[in-house]
Each structure stands twice: as structure tokens, then as C-alpha cells.
Amino acid sequence: MTTTIEKLRTVSVATLATALYKRGLRNQVIQDVRPLSPKDRNMVGPAFTLRYMPAREDRNQLAEFRNPDHPQRVAIEQCPKGHVMVMDSRKDARAASAGDILITRLMVRGGEGVVTDGGFRDADTIKDLDMRAYHHRPSSPTNLTINEAIDINVPIGCGDAPVFPGDMIVGDNDSVIVIPAHLADEIADEAVEMTAYEDFVVEKVKAGASIIGLYPATKDESLEEFAQWRARNNR
């Protein structure tokens, strides 16, 4: 049986955004983040979160990194296999959310991917890892200069999108979307159906068809032709 995660690997963030919009959810795309490099499959996994707050200078000296309980380090070591680590960096890329060593460790531990609405240092190295990573832009200063890692696996905002632990995160070569956990199964099913129809439409449009009555499907003949197309293509 095809799982929800397997289904979500085959659909675009744009299609998922439409499916969520039908349910009144308008703000689930994480704004102003982009992939460090394109990959050949979607990032799909439950959210594991890290929240940053504004740094206070007396709490955020370099010596803090010697603390074995430092939340940034602990979060990397606690993120479960197959999960996407999502960081609330206050949409502030003046200081890095993490660098290549921590993100490599996340990958080796089986992380599905990582998203921050801030920036990564060593971004040129991170882009070549065998794991998807999304950020706003490269950033070299350590996070301690601007942000303090304060909470692990709590509700956060990332790029203006609400993220709750366990929500399904999907990222493609365009952007990242957050699917509320209780909707993941039905959204995946609907998106697979929408993708099949859109593939049919693209084929028709490339062959010269008008979009009127075809996209959206307002003519019965379009639906009838789609049914025949699905049968021929085992979709």
C-alpha cells in the first residue's frame, strides 16, 4: 500500500497549497526560503522544531557552545530519523541558524531535511549534502551574535507559517509547505488526484488544446477524456 509519505513525494508544493486553500488554510507555505540546491525528490517528513529568540549578550558568549545541554546541539542529536528539522530563526539571516558540521550530523543521523527562515553558514558545503536544506540566504556569523536557541520541539512560526511538532513538511525545488498532521492523509490523496489531472492537462495544452473548459474542468468531455487518459496511462 502506498503510504502518505510516498504519495507526498510525487506532488508539488503548489498543488498542496491549492488543496489546503480549499480547506481555508492560506498561510501554510513557508515564505522567503529556498533550496540550497535542487534535488531529485521531495523532502517529506514530520516536523521537529527548534525555536530561537533574540540573544541577550550575557547569555550568549562562545563559551555557551561548551555546554552539553545547549539546545541547538541537543536538537540536532534528538531529531528523529525521517523527520524534518524546522527552525524559527525570527526571519533574521544576519546570523547563521547552523553550519555544515551540525547539518552533516543531522544527515548522518537520518534526518529527512532542514528548514530555517534565517540562514546557514558554510552554505556551499551544505548544498552538496545528500539531504534537502532550505534557508533565506547564506549567513556567516554564529547564531550567538543575534539569536539564542531556547526551545526544542514546540509550536513555532517559520517564515510566517505556523508549524506544530508532527505536522507534515513537504519541500520541492520551489518551496516548503506545512500540512497539519490531521490533514496529511486526505491532502496526500487529493494532491495525487490533482497531479494526475494536471499531467493530463499539460499533455493536452502542449498538443494545442485551449484551457477553456479544460483547466479547470468545466466541460464533461474534458472529464471523459481524462478518464480515458488515466486508463491508458495506468494513473
Image (spheres, grey):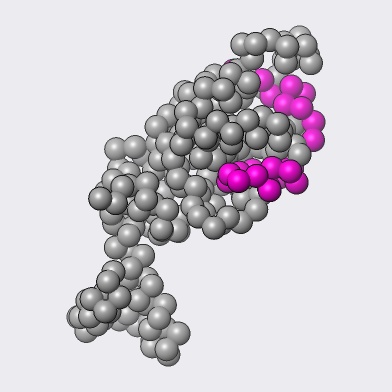
Q: Position of residue 96 (x, y in %)?
A: 72, 33
| Range shown magenta | 123-150
* In-front residue for pair 207/82: 82
* In-front residue for pair 79/170: 79
> With 14 as the anchor, is 158 left or right in this view?
right
* In-front residue for pair 175/216: 175
**Quadrant where the C terminus is found in the figure:** bottom left
Q: Position of residue 185 (x, y in %)?
A: 28, 46
Residue 133 belongs to magenta span: yes
Q: Is residue 160 visible?
A: no
| As drawn, 34 above or below 230 | above
| As drawn, 143 above or below 40 | above
> With 169 as the anchor, is 56 left or right in this view?
right
| As drawn, 59 above or below 159 | above
Give the quadrant of residue 181: top left
Q: Which residue sits furthest bottom?
A: 208
Residue 224 belongs to magenta span: no
> With 233 as the anchor, is 27 left or right in this view?
right
> With 138 as the anchor, is 187 left or right in this view?
left
Q: Position of residue 182 (x, y in %)?
A: 29, 38
Q: Residue at 58% across / 55% down in the picture?
A: 39
